[in-house]
Each structure stands twice: as C-alpha cells, then as structure tokens.
Amino acid sequence: MASVVIEAPDGTSLIFPLVKRLTSLGRSAENDIALAFAGMPDSALHFELAGDELRLVGHPGTDFSLNGKRRAEGRLQQGDQIALAGAKINVNLEAAPSAPKTDSGLLTHPSQVEAIRTLVRFSQRMMQQEDVQLVLEEMMDAAISLTRAEKGFLLLAEGDRMQVKVARNLPLRPGEGGSSSRSLEEALTRVSDSIVAKVVATRKPLIVADALHDTEFSKSESVINFRLSSVMAAPLLDKGEVMGLLYVGNDRAAYQFDPVSLELLTVFAAQASLIVVNALLLNRLRLEGLDLRRKLEAASFGSLIGACPGMREVFRRIEKVATTDISVLIGGETGTGKEMLAQEIHRRSSRAQKPFVAINCGAIPEGLLESELFGHVRGAFTGAVATRIGRFQASSGGTLFLDEVGDMPMALQVKILRALQEHTVVKVGDSRPETVDLRVVAATHRVLEDEVKAGRFREDLYYRLNVVQLTVPPLRDRGDDVLMLARYFLKHFGEELKSPGRALSKGAVEAIRRYRWPGNVRELENRIKKALVLSDRSLLTADDLELGGLSDDSVLSLSEAKTKFQREYINEILERNSGNRTKTARDLGVDARTIFRHLERLEAERTGQILPPSELDRELDT
C-alpha cells in the first residue's frame, strides 16, 4: 500500500496511506490530507493512483519542489521527497513506510521501525472493517501494545461531549486490583479530566512523564482514580476537528513514557483517525441503506416514490382510476415526473400487456405533428416515401400519453377531439377512417383552465381529457421526500455508474433541503448523476452538487417562516440529544407531550395519514 510520511516544520511526523484513486492535500479541511501549516495553500496538490503507478499533480499557484527541482507534476518513485510549505513529504511505494530521518530521532531505532510496520499491517486489516466497535477495541489494544502501556481508554465525540467507547485494565475504584476490566458506565463517570480537556482544546498530543509529581496534572481525576504514574493522550482528528482521543497510562514509575513513545502514539493516532473515519462512514452507509430500504418500502407505489401528503393523495387517485378506461389529465411543473405517473396508471390497468406510447406535443413542429399522431400514406407530402402508422394506431389496445398537450396547435385540437369521440383516425393523405381502441392520458405544465379562458385551448377538448385530474406537487413542497429521492438516486446511479458506497455530507443535506428545486425531480436526478461522475469524495458536498453558492431567495410569510424554523429547531435539538424526547422538552422549556406531538406530525406526513386535532397543536402552531 502506497503511503506518504510527512515531516512537519516542527519536527513531528505523520503517515498517511494512499488508498483512494485521488488523494488531495492542502490546508482546507475539505482535503483528504488536511495540513494547517503556515504557508500551506488551501488546495495544494493531489496524488493519483493508476495501477502500480503513483503520480503527483500540483494545483495552480502551488510552490513546491520534487527532489529539489520545481515541477508541476510527475511520476513518483520510491524515496522521492516533496518540499512544500516548510514540510517534507516522503513517498513510500512499499508495503510499509520507510523510516524518515528527523532531528527528533523518530523511527531511527529498529524497534520503532518494526512498530510502524506492525501499525501498517493493522491499518490494512482494519480499513475494510465496518464494525465500528470492533475497530475501536482492536485500536485500543494496538495502542496499548505499541506504547507498552498498561491501561487506557478511547473516547469519541458525540454531540458536544466525549464518550468512553473502550476501556482497558482500569480498576473499578481506588484500592482495587489494577488489571481487571472495568465497565464503560463506570468509566463515563470518571474521565471528566483536565488532561482530556487540554488535548481537546489544543488538538495536540500530550505527555505527562511523571504524573504524580507534575504541578499541572497531579490532581487530574484520571491520574488519581486510575493511579497512573505516567500518561499520554493523542487526539483523533477529522479534517482538523477533534472526533476522539486515545489515552494510555502506566502505574509503575519504572515504565515512564518518553518523547519517542509520544511520537509513536501520535503517528498511530493519525492512522487511527483515518481508520475510524472509514469505519464510521461504512457503518453510516450501511445504516442509511437499511433506513432507505425501509422508507422506500413504506413510500413506494410501484415505480413511484413519495411519502408526503400530496403524493399519497396522487397514489390514492391512481388506484381508483387505473382499472377504468376514463381519460386522466396530469398537471404539474416541468420535471415533476408526469410521464412516470402515466406509466404507473398503464401498468395497473387492464391494458398493461399492450403498448404504452408517448408523444411530446410541444417538441414536434406543427407541420409534422398531425403525421406523428395519425400517420400518413405514401406520397401524402414531400418525403412521405412509404405509408406509416401514427401514435394513435401504435397504441391501439394500450395507452397513449399526450405530454405537454397544452402546447398543441388549435387546428390539431379539433382532430384530436374527433378521434377521442369517435375512436377513429384518418391518416394524412387518406380518406379512410381506422378504428382505434385506446386510453388517453394527457399531461401539461400549463393551467389549462387559463388557456381555455384565453382562447388558446378548446373547452370541449379540455373536458374530454380532464375526466379525472391528478396534480403532482413540486419537489419544494414535498418535505423530506427530496432527501429520500436524493439517497435513492445516489444508490441507484452509484451502482449504474460503478461508483457505489457514496453518501451525502451534512452540508449537502442542508443545501438540498434549502434549495427550491425549480427543475424538480429531473434537476435533482441530474445533479446527483453529475456529482457521482465528477467527484472523488466518499461524502458528496454541497459544492459537488453545485449548490454551495446558491441561496434561497424565496420569501415566506411570517407564519410560514416561524413554523419552518420551529420544526427545524426541534429536529436539531432532538438530534443533538440523540433522540431523547424528555431531555429535548426540558431544553426547550415545553411539555414532553409537545415533542411527542411533533414526532407524530412528522410520521403522519411520512405515511400520508391525517391526525385528529389536539390541544397540543396550539403550542406548535403559535
């Protein structure tokens, strides 16, 4: 596995495995390798893996050298060194990273090199592991083995708190034997600690070689409770933010930690951070996949997906009309999926085994539209070299879908009306009527009532087409359907484009929720496809979806804005409290029943149910 060993300007070293096809490096937290060194560009360069070949590509404006020579890009060899922003980046193409030479003496001793080789083997074994708890437990054991510590614990950030996830060899209470494992519940109450607090605040590793006599930390709770004589702690970082912490200690003065031990733990923590992020991502994808499957099962209606009240009403009407032969008019903005509704009506009808034929009345020139609809005989017009049937004849026995019927010329509307009334058509250039047996489903983005009033659409044809009307709500009015559809497209097109295992970052989720989606479902589908093709990130960002610079310019009424904010704020506090409704109610200063009612409303929207009125609605709506 290729890797780079980065020697920071302050003498510390970090190892980063190159496991992706493209690995970006720079100061910005969006990079795969984020280095907050002075003079480091936000986006400096990237490494590109192509089979056994590793290439370096510098980004415009980046000042760096490769083996002492200024280069814009090039193929990398074992032992190459890149100089950038005061740091040295050593390239390793072998199974284990070679030992860099530093003033601190890091990795110069054979036992230290062997420790790093052990670490790399551990990394390779863990990178594909998605059981987060197993990863954390093996990581804690490896850290204790690597540093020759006797005790330790691993914490992960949950909200604004650090929670103990693994503890090893810590006594239950002062005075107990030192090697028995203690419960996590006990550990949770005894690590509110000055050492942990300092590492989290500074984001830097810390060593207390002689903890019992250290003026700053001798009164630390962990030192006292766990009777430690020497302590080390190193942060687990994700894009510059502390996501966890490794804490190891010894209780015998003969085994005090030294700076080399701290450097080993620091290197291990850097590797461990990547492994934890990978395991959390795999676990998140697995849970999101299960959640998506459950939601799709509840929200699917054949090939259609929707859980909002508007879509549930559309599904209810389709069930009613599909088995009949009455005409259906589908209204809705461009891109809302009107043709998919027409196809679902056809699939659920008695004509399902016969053809479904679609024609876009607004996309065909007026002079050709009649021939497309009714066919023509040979010689009927210039270029008519053979007799050809039209869409009416082709769909006989099945369903004809007239898309954008509101754009049809007035002269042709008369012929369409006659065909629907008499169930016969006449080819262009012919005089013989042909019988057709079909069902017509029409769709338009226009308001046909207004078109009728304006004299642009025949009233009699309008009533012939509009026996039952279905209105597809725009995506901006479909609530959490937009996220369900985004994740469905991510999974579906990820597999189709051979780019599986992708997810949406928190920023992307918020951007999708805020955006108004003028192009509706079609626009969402296109943005997801484009991001899957162009982005190399596992977590797609708002910028990948090209939503980063877009603002929501819509103006809501004060009542709508207040309701929207209140709903989102309750959800945010619920998430912060890990779904604890009682604590959320206490934090918000409301009755717990109000939070339960809020959740009932969300569930009702998801399933399309109607809740009976409650006195609690007053508190949520005012």
Image (cartoon, rainbow, N blue to C red):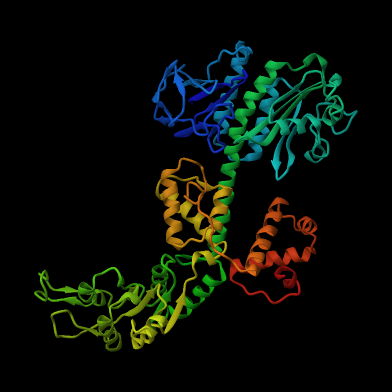
Position of 171 compared to 352: left or right?
right
Above or below, comparing residue 536 to residue 217 in the picture: below
Measured as percent of width and height from the top left, residue 414 is found at 27, 85
Q: Quadrant of residue 233?
A: top right
Q: Farthest residue in the right direction?
A: 175
Check the picture and name the quadrant holding the C terminus: bottom right
Q: Residue at x 40, y 78 (%)?
A: 329
Measured as percent of width and height from the top left, residue 120 is found at 56, 24
Position of 123 compared to 332: left or right?
right
Position of 587 compared to 511: left or right?
right
Q: Residue at x 29, y 68 (%)?
A: 363
Measured as percent of width and height from the top left, residue 54 is found at 42, 26
Q: Quadrant of residue 110?
A: top right
Total numbered badges shown on the rendered structure: 0
Position of 231 compared to 118: left or right?
right
Report the front residue among 86 and 228: 86
Measured as percent of width and height from the top left, residue 605 is found at 61, 68
Report the front residue among 53 and 28: 28
Above or below, comparing residue 380 to residue 66 in the picture: below
Q: Residue at x 84, y 20 (%)?
A: 214
Above or below, comparing residue 246 to residue 519 in the picture: above
